[in-house]
Image (tube, rainbow, N blue to C red):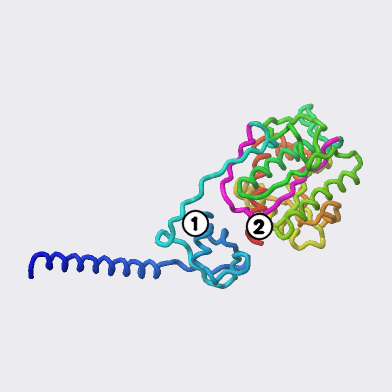
Amino acid sequence: MNHSNLHIKRWKHVILMVIIFQLCTNIYSNNNVKEVVAKRGDGIYVLLRRHNLPSAYFSEFVELNKGKLGKNNTLIAGRKYKLPTANTTTVKPAAAETKTYPIFGKDHEDVTIKSSELKGAVYYLVAGHGGPDPGAIGKYNGKRLCEDEYAYDVTIRLAKKLIEEGATVYMITRDPNDGIRDESYLKIDRDEVCYPNLKIPLNQTKRLRQRKDAVNKLYLKHKGQYQRMVAIHVDSRSKGNNIDVFFYHDKRSDSGKKTALSLQKTFQQKYKQHQPNRGYKGTVTARNLYVLKYTYPVAVYIELGNINHYRDQQRFIITNNRKAVANWLALGLSNNFKGR
């Protein structure tokens, strides 16, 4: 055999070995694709997160499981699904996106969208009172504490947190210049408006109807999506009543009750974590309230505490406490969305 034929034969042998190696690698990879069983209430994002995979793997998951998914890429409980792995995907987590929302104020208006965990969720946030009605008024160290200002600050912090997780959020009660505020004593004003820019009436019935109409009009725009209305207030009782954050829902709404229970459970867990010896006694109750009864989306009504009680007032005047309450509310709403 001449040298030319020997050289060709050797190259054919090398090529054959490479092909065999690639086939073996593909067989090994396919055999090691992890399969998991979907639980009741699971969505793709929930399943990915449970197995420590970022939401950027959504498209790859759908591709891997063609023919196994329900309508609109829903998961079917009890069915096995393949998870993306390093051997089956080259997807990289998407770069964080930053959007500007002037309503949050100059120091907070640039919002980084950190995840798509709440993509598809729509929230209508209604801070209590506002405009000509300050709501309940308490006093602390000679300073007046107005319900509408503190409810608004927690609500707008909640809005930002939900947007960071990919939700669509409407602030129904809006202040053109307050934004998120870090002071202990929040300045009292009367310039709040109702979405999109309506003057808030003093008459309570007209005010509630105005907010209901704003929410219901937006609801029709997003019909078919997951939607929640959240009303946030501050209670007013005697100075001797120390209360925890508690929740109301419409008696006819099982979904409203489920949302409220999800929020309550989150607060129970957080109090156990941060104040293990304190306990948490916030309740979930059905109540015949106008905003719960007449708004189209599933609704929950939240009381943050007693504006006249010294310890509850710490929940309002300490900035980090307002931030924590907003974060816990966001987590509870997120858990409800993922477990729907």
Which quadrant of the figure contains the C terminus?
bottom right
Count of picture labels: 2
Q: Residues within 10 Å of mark 1 (few under 14, many from 20)?
A: some
Residue depicted at 56% across the width and 43% down the height: 97
Q: Quadrant of residue 131?
A: top right
Q: Amino acid at mark 1?
A: Leu
Residue 277 coordinates in the image, percent (x, y): 63, 48
Q: Which mark, residue 53? A: 1
Question: Element under label 2?
Answer: helix
Query: Can see residue 318?
Result: no
Which quadrant of the figure contains the N terminus?
bottom left
Magenta residues, as a range?
Answer: 107-131
Residue 275 coordinates in the image, percent (x, y): 63, 46
Can you identify the residue that label 2 sits on? 337
In this rendering, position of residue 163 left or right of residue 237: left
Residue 219 coordinates in the image, percent (x, y): 77, 54
- The answer to if 122 sits in the magenta stretch is yes
Toward the top, the furthest residue is 142
Q: Quadrant of residue 187?
A: top right
Residue 23 coordinates in the image, percent (x, y): 32, 69
Q: CA distance from mark 2 to mark 1?
A: 19 Å
Query: Can see residue 316?
Result: yes
